[in-house]
């Protein structure tokens, strides 16, 4: 995940990553890995990512944005 974000132009100190693994298989995120990213310049928004480990090139794709309370606009800075 870090390599994916760095390839998009981010520095490692600009975000925080939380990865959860669902050992029973696919979770709500569409795979066993649920990856949440919070960017330091937008701390009230969680960006969800999916790691498609079964694909040939091991794709990482953004699959959701969840504004936390107090975020009424939809102008998210880090949409892919």
Image (spheres, grey):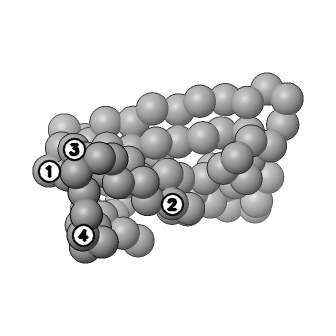
Q: Answer whether residue 17 is visible to the viewer in this image.
A: yes
Which of pointers 2 and 4 indicates the residue nearer the eye?
4
The residue wearing badge 3 is: 43
What's the distance in space between the residues labelled 2 and 1, CA to CA?
18 Å
- Left or right of 65 in this view: 8: left
- The tag on residue 73 is 4
Mark 1 → mark 3, Cα distance in angstroms: 6 Å
The answer to whether the residues at label 2 and label 4 have Cβ atoms under 8 Å apart is: no
| Category of crowding for the residue at label 4, using alpha-carbon neighbours closer than 10 angstroms: few (below 14), some (14–19), many (at least 20) | few
* Residue at mark 1: 41
- The mark lying in front, picked from 1 and 4, is 4
Mark 2, other Cα within 10 Å: few <14 / some 14–19 / many ≥20: some
Q: Residue at x 43, y 59 (%)?
A: 65
Q: Are marks 1 and 3 in contact (CB under 8 Å)?
A: yes
From mark 2 to mark 4, how far is it between C-alphas?
16 Å
In this orientation, does residue 39 appear? Answer: no
Q: Disc 4 and disc 3: Cα gap in Å? A: 14 Å
55 in relation to 14, above or below = below
- Asked whether 34 or 44 is in front, the reply is 44
Residue labelled with disc 2: 64
């Amino acid at each position: 995940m870090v390599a994916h974000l760095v390839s998009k132009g981010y520095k490692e100190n600009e975000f925080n990553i939380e990865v959860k693994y669902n050992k029973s298989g696919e979770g709500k995120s569409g795979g066993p890995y649920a990856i949440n990213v919070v960017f330091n310049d937008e701390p009230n928004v969680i960006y969800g990512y999916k790691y498609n480990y079964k694909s040939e090139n091991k794709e990482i794709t953004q699959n959701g944005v969840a504004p936390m309370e107090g975020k009424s606009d939809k102008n998210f800075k880090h949409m892919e």
